[in-house]
Amino acid sequence: MQGRARQSAGFSLVELVVTVTLLALVVIPVLGAVRGAVQASAISYDAAAVETALVNAAEAVQREPLDCDHPVGAYSDAVAASQGAVADETDRPAVVLRGVAVRSVSGTCSSLSAVQEVTITMTSGGVTRAVVVVKSRV
């Protein structure tokens, strides 16, 4: 016998370490890309929820009467009702539908020109959007 024949019963420790390292170099960037896609999807969902809620709120404000004596708090009630929520005692709606929160409802009115401007701001997650509803008799 000149020498022992090499037994090929499995992989050496060095081969296993190299394989695991190469696999990690491929998998880690893929996991980062998946995480980024999930975050982008969540932001997109929040933006869609806010924009839908804003459209509903703007339509509710538009249905309210044009009257400079009409308090902005009444618009808060209309906005809350458009979201399926009930305004609390402070005239600030407690909107919790799909995580959308009404941040502010403010307005100005010019009785001379019969134009009323109502600004609605909503937030969900990291997305904040605002819409200005202009009402007039013209």
Image (tube, rainbow, N blue to C red):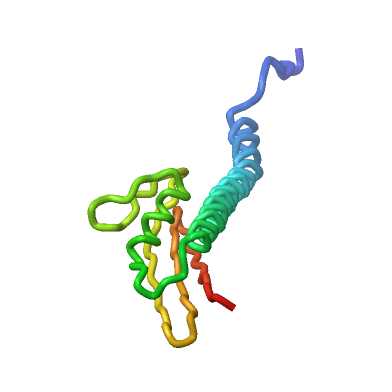
Camera-nearest residue between 34 and 22: 34
The residue positioned 37% from the left and 55% from the top of the image is 77
The residue positioned 44% from the left and 43% from the top of the image is 84
Q: Is residue 36 above or below residue 1?
A: below
Camera-nearest residue between 42 and 32: 42
Visible in this render: residue 39?
no
- Is the N terminus in the top left, top right, bottom left or bottom right quadrant? top right
Visible in this render: residue 5?
yes
The residue positioned 39% from the left and 75% from the top of the image is 68
- Is the C terminus in the top left, top right, bottom left or bottom right quadrant? bottom right
Q: Position of residue 37 (x, y in %)?
A: 61, 49
The residue positioned 44% from the left and 87% from the top of the image is 112
Q: Residue furthest bottom?
A: 112
Q: Is residue 76 above or below residue 136?
A: above
Q: Position of residue 22 (x, y in %)?
A: 65, 41
Q: Position of residue 120 (x, y in %)?
A: 45, 65
Q: Does residue 38 appear left or right of residue 87 in this picture?
A: right
Camera-nearest residue between 101 and 83: 83
